[in-house]
Image (cartoon, rainbow, N blue to C red):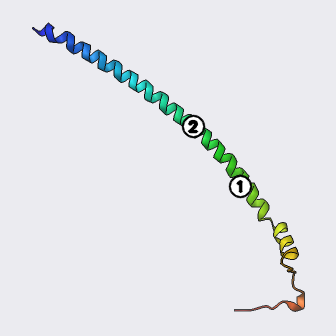
């Protein structure tokens, strides 16, 4: 009597195990693909960040700011007699 239900039980366990392995392999491949996508995105974002840092340093350079202040805004350094010192 025991042998009667043992074979179907073992068959179900083997099929369940095979399905579990197939699912695990599928998930591993899906996650590996997602990891590769994220690494690619990270490299792209790091490149963009470097470009933005370079652009930031260019736009904010003292020479550029001073040139724009002189040319566009007509600003100049005050002469010595035009300076006022305020003490607290």
The numbered disc on residue 71 is none
| 38 shown above or below 82 | above
Viewer-proximal residue among 49 and 72: 72
Residue at 35% across, 23% down = 20
Question: On the rendered structure, is 1 left or right of 46?
Answer: left
Residue situated in front as seen by the camera: 86 or 30:
30
Q: Is residue 64 left or right of residue 30?
A: right
Relative to 88, say whether 52 is above or below.
above
Question: Label 1: which residue?
Answer: 52
State the quadrant of the N terminus.
top left
> CA–CA distance between discs 1 and 2?
22 Å
| Residue behind mark 2 | 37
Is mark 1 in CB contact (under 8 Å) with mark 2?
Answer: no
- Where's residue 7, x and y in %? 20, 9
Q: Quadrant of the C terminus?
A: bottom right
User: On the picture, is 35 further left or further right than 8?
Assistant: right
Q: Nearer the viewer, residue 47 or 82?
A: 47
Q: Secondary structure at mark 1?
A: helix
Query: Could you say which is closer to the camera, residue 79 or residue 19?
Result: 19
Residue at point 65%, 42% (across, down):
43
The x and y percentages for residue 41 are 61, 42
Above or below: residue 40 compared with residue 14: below
How many marks do you count on the picture?
A: 2
Judge the density around disc 1: few (<14), some (14-19), many (≥20) Cα neighbours within 10 Å. Answer: few
Q: Residue at x 44, y 24 (%)?
A: 25
Residue 56 location, quadrant: bottom right
């Amino acid at each position: 009597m025991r042998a009667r239900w043992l074979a179907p039980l073992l068959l179900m366990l083997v099929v369940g195990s095979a399905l579990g392995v197939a699912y695990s392999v599928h998930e591993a491949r899906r996650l590996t693909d997602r990891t590769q996508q994220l690494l690619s995105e990270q490299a792209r974002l790091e490149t963009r960040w470097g470009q933005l840092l370079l652009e930031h340093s260019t736009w904010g350079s003292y020479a550029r700011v001073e040139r724009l202040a002189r040319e566009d805004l007509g600003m100049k350094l005050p002469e010595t007699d035009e300076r006022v010192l305020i003490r607290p």
